[in-house]
Amino acid sequence: MKADFYEILGVSKGADDKELKAAFRKLAMQYHPDRNPGDAACEHKFKEINEAYETLKDPQKRAAYDRFGHAAFENGGMGGQGFGANGFSAGGFADIFEDIFGDMMGGRRQRSSGGRERGADLRYNMEITLEEAFSGKTAQIRVPASVTCTECSGTGARPGTQPTTCNTCSGSGRVRATQGFFSIERTCPTCQGRGQIIKDPCQKCSGHGRVIEERSLSVNIPAGIDDGTRIRLAGEGEAGIRGGPPGDLYIFLSVKPHELFQRDGADLYCKVPISMTTAALGGSFEVTTLDGTQTRVKVPEGSQNGRQFRLKGKGMPVLRQPSVGDLYIQVSVETPQNLTRRQRELLEEFERLSSQENSPQSSGFFSRMKDFFESFGER
Protein backbone atom coordinates (compact mmCIF):
# COMPACT_ATOMS: atom_id res chain seq x y z
CA MET A 1 0.00 0.00 0.00
CA LYS A 2 1.38 3.41 -1.00
CA ALA A 3 2.25 5.88 1.74
CA ASP A 4 0.32 9.11 2.01
CA PHE A 5 1.86 11.90 -0.10
CA TYR A 6 1.50 14.47 2.67
CA GLU A 7 3.23 12.13 5.14
CA ILE A 8 6.05 11.50 2.64
CA LEU A 9 6.74 15.24 2.39
CA GLY A 10 6.10 15.81 6.09
CA VAL A 11 3.48 18.54 5.57
CA SER A 12 -0.13 19.01 6.54
CA LYS A 13 -3.03 18.78 4.06
CA GLY A 14 -3.41 22.54 4.27
CA ALA A 15 0.20 23.29 3.26
CA ASP A 16 0.59 25.99 0.61
CA ASP A 17 2.88 25.90 -2.44
CA LYS A 18 5.76 27.55 -0.57
CA GLU A 19 5.67 24.94 2.21
CA LEU A 20 5.49 22.10 -0.33
CA LYS A 21 8.48 23.38 -2.26
CA ALA A 22 10.55 23.94 0.88
CA ALA A 23 9.79 20.44 2.16
CA PHE A 24 10.59 18.89 -1.23
CA ARG A 25 13.89 20.79 -1.53
CA LYS A 26 15.05 19.64 1.90
CA LEU A 27 14.17 15.99 1.34
CA ALA A 28 15.48 15.89 -2.23
CA MET A 29 18.86 17.18 -1.09
CA GLN A 30 18.94 14.53 1.64
CA TYR A 31 17.95 11.50 -0.44
CA HIS A 32 19.17 12.26 -3.95
CA PRO A 33 21.08 9.23 -5.40
CA ASP A 34 24.09 11.40 -6.33
CA ARG A 35 24.59 12.16 -2.67
CA ASN A 36 23.96 8.56 -1.67
CA PRO A 37 25.65 6.44 -4.36
CA GLY A 38 24.77 2.77 -4.24
CA ASP A 39 22.05 3.23 -1.59
CA ALA A 40 18.92 1.58 -3.01
CA ALA A 41 16.77 2.69 -0.06
CA CYS A 42 17.63 6.36 -0.66
CA GLU A 43 16.92 5.99 -4.37
CA HIS A 44 13.47 4.53 -3.61
CA LYS A 45 12.77 7.24 -1.05
CA PHE A 46 13.76 9.92 -3.56
CA LYS A 47 11.32 8.54 -6.13
CA GLU A 48 8.52 8.62 -3.54
CA ILE A 49 9.37 12.22 -2.64
CA ASN A 50 9.41 13.29 -6.28
CA GLU A 51 6.10 11.55 -7.05
CA ALA A 52 4.45 13.15 -4.01
CA TYR A 53 5.64 16.64 -4.91
CA GLU A 54 4.75 16.22 -8.59
CA THR A 55 1.19 15.37 -7.57
CA LEU A 56 0.61 17.92 -4.82
CA LYS A 57 2.12 20.92 -6.59
CA ASP A 58 -0.46 20.60 -9.40
CA PRO A 59 -3.85 22.04 -8.21
CA GLN A 60 -5.94 19.61 -10.31
CA LYS A 61 -3.95 16.54 -9.32
CA ARG A 62 -3.96 17.63 -5.69
CA ALA A 63 -7.76 18.06 -5.70
CA ALA A 64 -8.19 14.60 -7.22
CA TYR A 65 -5.80 13.07 -4.70
CA ASP A 66 -7.55 14.76 -1.75
CA ARG A 67 -10.89 13.27 -2.94
CA PHE A 68 -9.90 9.81 -4.22
CA GLY A 69 -6.42 9.19 -2.85
CA HIS A 70 -4.07 7.02 -4.93
CA ALA A 71 -7.03 5.55 -6.80
CA ALA A 72 -7.32 8.83 -8.71
CA PHE A 73 -4.22 7.87 -10.74
CA GLU A 74 -4.76 4.16 -11.15
CA ASN A 75 -6.28 2.45 -14.21
CA GLY A 76 -5.74 5.55 -16.32
CA GLY A 77 -7.31 7.95 -13.90
CA MET A 78 -6.14 11.55 -14.57
CA GLY A 79 -3.65 10.09 -17.03
CA GLY A 80 -1.03 11.30 -14.56
CA GLN A 81 2.29 12.16 -16.03
CA GLY A 82 4.11 10.06 -13.48
CA PHE A 83 7.81 9.32 -14.03
CA GLY A 84 10.03 9.31 -17.03
CA ALA A 85 12.15 6.46 -18.26
CA ASN A 86 14.66 7.02 -15.48
CA GLY A 87 12.05 7.15 -12.75
CA PHE A 88 12.36 10.92 -12.22
CA SER A 89 9.72 13.49 -13.04
CA ALA A 90 10.62 16.12 -15.61
CA GLY A 91 8.48 18.71 -13.86
CA GLY A 92 8.98 19.45 -10.19
CA PHE A 93 12.70 18.90 -10.06
CA ALA A 94 13.78 21.38 -12.75
CA ASP A 95 13.21 24.56 -10.78
CA ILE A 96 15.32 23.51 -7.79
CA PHE A 97 18.00 21.47 -9.58
CA GLU A 98 20.56 24.22 -9.25
CA ASP A 99 19.71 24.75 -5.57
CA ILE A 100 20.54 21.12 -4.85
CA PHE A 101 23.62 20.76 -7.03
CA GLY A 102 25.00 24.30 -6.93
CA ASP A 103 27.77 23.36 -4.51
CA MET A 104 28.36 19.87 -5.90
CA MET A 105 28.86 21.08 -9.49
CA GLY A 106 31.34 23.84 -8.76
CA GLY A 107 29.30 26.44 -6.95
CA ARG A 108 28.20 29.72 -8.41
CA ARG A 109 29.44 30.36 -11.92
CA GLN A 110 31.64 33.31 -12.64
CA ARG A 111 30.12 36.18 -14.51
CA SER A 112 31.66 37.54 -17.66
CA SER A 113 34.47 40.04 -17.12
CA GLY A 114 33.44 42.29 -19.97
CA GLY A 115 35.03 40.12 -22.65
CA ARG A 116 38.53 40.44 -21.14
CA GLU A 117 40.58 37.27 -21.38
CA ARG A 118 44.13 36.47 -20.34
CA GLY A 119 46.62 36.29 -23.17
CA ALA A 120 48.28 33.02 -24.13
CA ASP A 121 51.71 32.00 -22.86
CA LEU A 122 54.54 31.93 -25.39
CA ARG A 123 57.57 29.66 -25.78
CA TYR A 124 60.98 30.73 -27.10
CA ASN A 125 63.77 28.19 -27.67
CA MET A 126 67.30 29.51 -27.09
CA GLU A 127 70.58 27.67 -27.62
CA ILE A 128 73.70 28.78 -25.74
CA THR A 129 77.29 27.56 -25.55
CA LEU A 130 78.82 25.82 -22.55
CA GLU A 131 81.05 28.88 -22.06
CA GLU A 132 77.94 31.10 -21.87
CA ALA A 133 76.34 28.71 -19.38
CA PHE A 134 79.57 28.90 -17.34
CA SER A 135 79.83 32.68 -17.17
CA GLY A 136 76.19 33.73 -17.74
CA LYS A 137 75.11 36.39 -20.18
CA THR A 138 72.47 38.95 -21.07
CA ALA A 139 70.86 38.05 -24.39
CA GLN A 140 68.69 40.17 -26.65
CA ILE A 141 65.88 38.34 -28.39
CA ARG A 142 63.15 39.41 -30.80
CA VAL A 143 59.72 37.86 -30.27
CA PRO A 144 56.73 38.33 -32.60
CA ALA A 145 53.59 38.41 -30.46
CA SER A 146 50.22 40.05 -29.98
CA VAL A 147 50.39 43.33 -28.10
CA THR A 148 47.65 45.62 -26.83
CA CYS A 149 46.30 47.91 -29.52
CA THR A 150 47.33 51.46 -28.71
CA GLU A 151 44.52 52.93 -30.81
CA CYS A 152 41.69 51.51 -28.68
CA SER A 153 43.67 50.67 -25.52
CA GLY A 154 42.69 47.03 -25.94
CA THR A 155 38.90 47.48 -25.86
CA GLY A 156 38.46 46.57 -29.51
CA ALA A 157 36.03 49.46 -30.00
CA ARG A 158 36.68 52.53 -32.15
CA PRO A 159 38.10 55.40 -30.09
CA GLY A 160 35.25 57.40 -28.58
CA THR A 161 32.92 54.39 -28.41
CA GLN A 162 32.49 51.55 -25.96
CA PRO A 163 31.43 47.89 -26.25
CA THR A 164 27.78 47.29 -25.42
CA THR A 165 26.26 44.59 -23.23
CA CYS A 166 25.10 41.51 -25.13
CA ASN A 167 21.29 41.34 -25.17
CA THR A 168 21.23 37.56 -25.59
CA CYS A 169 23.01 36.74 -22.33
CA SER A 170 22.63 40.10 -20.55
CA GLY A 171 26.40 40.33 -20.19
CA SER A 172 26.94 36.96 -18.50
CA GLY A 173 28.51 35.30 -21.54
CA ARG A 174 26.37 32.20 -20.91
CA VAL A 175 22.87 31.13 -21.90
CA ARG A 176 20.78 28.48 -20.20
CA ALA A 177 18.41 25.93 -21.66
CA THR A 178 16.21 23.47 -19.76
CA GLN A 179 15.97 19.88 -20.96
CA GLY A 180 13.74 17.81 -18.74
CA PHE A 181 14.83 18.41 -15.19
CA PHE A 182 18.36 19.34 -16.30
CA SER A 183 19.33 22.98 -16.63
CA ILE A 184 22.11 23.18 -19.24
CA GLU A 185 24.37 26.20 -19.62
CA ARG A 186 26.48 26.94 -22.68
CA THR A 187 28.55 29.74 -24.19
CA CYS A 188 26.48 32.57 -25.60
CA PRO A 189 26.48 32.18 -29.42
CA THR A 190 26.03 35.91 -29.99
CA CYS A 191 29.06 37.25 -28.08
CA GLN A 192 31.08 33.98 -27.89
CA GLY A 193 31.09 34.17 -24.10
CA ARG A 194 32.50 37.69 -23.80
CA GLY A 195 29.29 39.31 -22.57
CA GLN A 196 29.80 42.33 -24.81
CA ILE A 197 29.24 43.26 -28.43
CA ILE A 198 31.41 45.66 -30.41
CA LYS A 199 29.19 47.45 -32.87
CA ASP A 200 31.86 49.87 -34.10
CA PRO A 201 35.22 48.04 -34.10
CA CYS A 202 38.63 49.70 -34.00
CA GLN A 203 40.09 49.98 -37.49
CA LYS A 204 43.65 49.23 -36.39
CA CYS A 205 42.94 45.91 -34.64
CA SER A 206 39.59 45.03 -36.30
CA GLY A 207 37.92 44.77 -32.92
CA HIS A 208 40.36 42.24 -31.42
CA GLY A 209 42.05 44.72 -29.10
CA ARG A 210 45.45 43.29 -30.14
CA VAL A 211 47.90 43.65 -33.02
CA ILE A 212 50.95 41.59 -34.02
CA GLU A 213 54.32 43.25 -33.40
CA GLU A 214 57.91 42.11 -32.98
CA ARG A 215 59.33 43.04 -29.61
CA SER A 216 62.93 43.19 -28.46
CA LEU A 217 63.46 41.72 -25.01
CA SER A 218 66.46 41.37 -22.73
CA VAL A 219 66.95 37.96 -21.10
CA ASN A 220 69.30 37.50 -18.16
CA ILE A 221 70.93 34.06 -18.20
CA PRO A 222 72.60 33.39 -14.82
CA ALA A 223 75.93 31.59 -14.50
CA GLY A 224 75.57 27.84 -13.96
CA ILE A 225 72.34 27.48 -15.94
CA ASP A 226 71.70 23.88 -16.96
CA ASP A 227 70.44 22.33 -20.17
CA GLY A 228 66.62 22.24 -20.28
CA THR A 229 66.18 25.09 -17.79
CA ARG A 230 63.06 27.23 -18.27
CA ILE A 231 63.15 30.98 -17.62
CA ARG A 232 59.80 32.76 -17.11
CA LEU A 233 59.30 36.36 -18.15
CA ALA A 234 56.05 37.37 -16.47
CA GLY A 235 53.67 39.44 -18.59
CA GLU A 236 55.75 39.15 -21.77
CA GLY A 237 53.46 36.68 -23.55
CA GLU A 238 50.45 37.40 -25.74
CA ALA A 239 48.45 40.48 -24.84
CA GLY A 240 45.08 39.81 -23.22
CA ILE A 241 41.89 40.06 -25.26
CA ARG A 242 40.14 43.41 -24.91
CA GLY A 243 42.24 44.67 -22.05
CA GLY A 244 42.72 41.32 -20.30
CA PRO A 245 46.03 40.53 -18.52
CA PRO A 246 48.92 39.35 -20.71
CA GLY A 247 50.34 35.84 -20.68
CA ASP A 248 53.92 34.90 -19.85
CA LEU A 249 56.95 34.18 -22.02
CA TYR A 250 58.93 31.01 -21.27
CA ILE A 251 62.53 30.76 -22.48
CA PHE A 252 63.58 27.11 -22.90
CA LEU A 253 67.38 26.85 -22.85
CA SER A 254 69.51 24.17 -24.47
CA VAL A 255 73.29 24.02 -24.12
CA LYS A 256 75.28 23.08 -27.21
CA PRO A 257 77.56 20.02 -26.94
CA HIS A 258 81.15 21.12 -26.35
CA GLU A 259 84.10 19.93 -28.40
CA LEU A 260 86.32 19.22 -25.38
CA PHE A 261 84.23 19.13 -22.21
CA GLN A 262 81.29 17.00 -21.13
CA ARG A 263 79.06 18.18 -18.32
CA ASP A 264 77.45 16.24 -15.50
CA GLY A 265 75.64 18.66 -13.20
CA ALA A 266 78.30 21.01 -11.84
CA ASP A 267 81.21 18.74 -12.80
CA LEU A 268 83.11 18.76 -16.08
CA TYR A 269 84.95 15.88 -17.76
CA CYS A 270 87.72 16.08 -20.32
CA LYS A 271 89.65 13.26 -22.01
CA VAL A 272 93.30 14.09 -22.73
CA PRO A 273 95.56 11.84 -24.86
CA ILE A 274 99.13 11.34 -23.61
CA SER A 275 102.03 9.46 -25.08
CA MET A 276 103.06 6.00 -23.99
CA THR A 277 106.39 7.32 -22.72
CA THR A 278 104.69 10.04 -20.63
CA ALA A 279 102.44 7.41 -19.07
CA ALA A 280 105.40 5.12 -18.38
CA LEU A 281 108.03 7.64 -17.29
CA GLY A 282 105.70 10.30 -15.84
CA GLY A 283 105.43 13.91 -16.90
CA SER A 284 102.94 16.74 -17.07
CA PHE A 285 100.70 18.67 -19.45
CA GLU A 286 98.63 21.86 -19.38
CA VAL A 287 94.86 22.17 -19.85
CA THR A 288 92.82 25.31 -20.38
CA THR A 289 89.70 25.42 -18.21
CA LEU A 290 86.41 27.16 -19.07
CA ASP A 291 87.39 30.25 -17.10
CA GLY A 292 90.33 30.69 -19.48
CA THR A 293 93.11 29.83 -17.03
CA GLN A 294 95.92 27.32 -17.63
CA THR A 295 96.29 24.47 -15.16
CA ARG A 296 99.19 21.98 -15.12
CA VAL A 297 98.37 18.33 -14.54
CA LYS A 298 101.15 16.03 -13.24
CA VAL A 299 101.17 12.46 -14.54
CA PRO A 300 102.79 9.99 -12.14
CA GLU A 301 105.16 7.32 -13.43
CA GLY A 302 103.32 4.19 -14.59
CA SER A 303 99.90 5.84 -15.09
CA GLN A 304 97.41 3.53 -16.78
CA ASN A 305 94.97 4.30 -19.57
CA GLY A 306 91.73 5.84 -18.23
CA ARG A 307 93.24 7.23 -15.01
CA GLN A 308 91.42 10.33 -13.75
CA PHE A 309 92.82 13.46 -12.17
CA ARG A 310 90.55 15.80 -10.22
CA LEU A 311 90.98 19.56 -10.46
CA LYS A 312 88.94 20.89 -7.56
CA GLY A 313 86.84 23.99 -8.18
CA LYS A 314 87.50 24.05 -11.93
CA GLY A 315 84.06 22.85 -12.98
CA MET A 316 80.76 24.69 -13.48
CA PRO A 317 79.36 27.21 -11.00
CA VAL A 318 76.26 26.02 -9.16
CA LEU A 319 73.21 28.09 -10.08
CA ARG A 320 72.61 30.90 -7.54
CA GLN A 321 75.07 29.32 -5.07
CA PRO A 322 78.68 30.16 -4.19
CA SER A 323 79.92 26.59 -4.73
CA VAL A 324 81.67 25.37 -7.89
CA GLY A 325 81.99 21.88 -9.32
CA ASP A 326 85.18 20.01 -10.24
CA LEU A 327 86.98 19.22 -13.49
CA TYR A 328 87.98 15.58 -14.05
CA ILE A 329 90.80 14.91 -16.50
CA GLN A 330 90.92 11.38 -17.89
CA VAL A 331 94.12 10.36 -19.65
CA SER A 332 94.06 8.21 -22.73
CA VAL A 333 97.39 6.51 -23.43
CA GLU A 334 98.13 6.68 -27.14
CA THR A 335 99.90 3.80 -28.86
CA PRO A 336 102.75 4.96 -31.14
CA GLN A 337 102.12 4.78 -34.87
CA ASN A 338 104.27 5.13 -38.02
CA LEU A 339 107.41 3.91 -36.24
CA THR A 340 110.86 4.39 -37.76
CA ARG A 341 113.25 1.44 -37.93
CA ARG A 342 115.22 2.75 -34.97
CA GLN A 343 112.07 3.26 -32.88
CA ARG A 344 110.95 -0.30 -33.68
CA GLU A 345 114.37 -1.67 -32.70
CA LEU A 346 114.24 0.14 -29.39
CA LEU A 347 110.72 -1.14 -28.64
CA GLU A 348 111.72 -4.70 -29.55
CA GLU A 349 114.71 -4.42 -27.24
CA PHE A 350 112.45 -3.05 -24.51
CA GLU A 351 110.11 -6.02 -25.02
CA ARG A 352 112.99 -8.49 -24.62
CA LEU A 353 114.10 -6.78 -21.43
CA SER A 354 110.58 -6.54 -19.98
CA SER A 355 109.43 -8.75 -17.12
CA GLN A 356 106.13 -9.50 -15.44
CA GLU A 357 106.78 -6.64 -13.04
CA ASN A 358 106.60 -4.17 -15.94
CA SER A 359 103.04 -5.30 -16.91
CA PRO A 360 101.51 -6.77 -13.75
CA GLN A 361 97.88 -6.50 -14.94
CA SER A 362 98.33 -8.40 -18.21
CA SER A 363 100.61 -10.98 -16.60
CA GLY A 364 98.14 -11.55 -13.79
CA PHE A 365 95.20 -11.82 -16.18
CA PHE A 366 96.76 -14.47 -18.40
CA SER A 367 98.00 -16.39 -15.37
CA ARG A 368 94.45 -16.54 -13.97
CA MET A 369 93.11 -17.58 -17.36
CA LYS A 370 95.63 -20.43 -17.56
CA ASP A 371 94.73 -21.66 -14.10
CA PHE A 372 91.02 -21.56 -14.96
CA PHE A 373 91.32 -23.73 -18.06
CA GLU A 374 93.67 -26.19 -16.32
CA SER A 375 91.16 -26.66 -13.50
CA PHE A 376 88.33 -26.91 -16.06
CA GLY A 377 90.14 -29.76 -17.87
CA GLU A 378 90.59 -31.75 -14.65
CA ARG A 379 86.83 -31.95 -14.02
Image: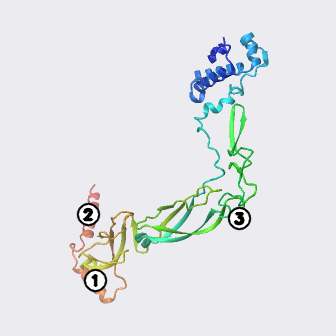
Q: What amino acid does circle 3 point to?
A: Lys
CA–CA distance in space, label 2 to label 3: 86 Å
Residue picked out by circle 1: 347
Q: Does residue 210 sit above or below 114 in this rendering? A: below
Q: Quadrant of residue 274?
A: bottom left
Which residue corresponds to the image point at 77% horizontal and 14% vertical from the top-left?
75
N-terminal label among 3 and 1? 3
Characterize the local packing of mark 1: few (<14), some (14-19) or many (20 or more) Cα atoms within 10 angstroms. few
CA–CA distance in space, label 3 to label 1: 84 Å
Answer whether labels 3 and 1 touch (C-beta < 8 Å). Answer: no
N-terminal label among 2 and 3? 3
Which residue corresponds to the image point at 52% horizontal and 59% vertical from the top-left?
234
Characterize the local packing of mark 3: few (<14), some (14-19) or many (20 or more) Cα atoms within 10 angstroms. some
Q: In terms of secondary structure, where does tag 2 sit? A: helix
Which residue corresponds to the image point at 65% horizontal and 47% vertical from the top-left?
112
Which residue corresponds to the image point at 28% horizontal and 72% vertical from the top-left?
304
N-terminal label among 2 and 1? 1
State the quadrant of the N terminus: top right
Q: In terms of secondary structure, where does tag 3 sit? A: loop
Q: What amino acid does circle 1 point to?
A: Leu
Q: Does residue 317 sit above or below 197 in this rendering? A: below
Question: Which dot marks residue 156?
Answer: none
Q: In terms of secondary structure, where does tag 1 sit? A: helix
Q: Which of the two residues, 366 or 18, is positioned nearer the viewer here?
A: 18
Say left or right for 68 vs 309.
right
State the quadrant of the C terminus: bottom left
Residue picked out by circle 2: 368
The picture places residue 173, in percent across and down from the top left corner, at 68, 46
Residue furthest front as drawn: 160
CA–CA distance in space, label 2 to label 1: 27 Å
Q: Is residue 61 visible to us here?
A: yes
Residue picked out by circle 3: 204
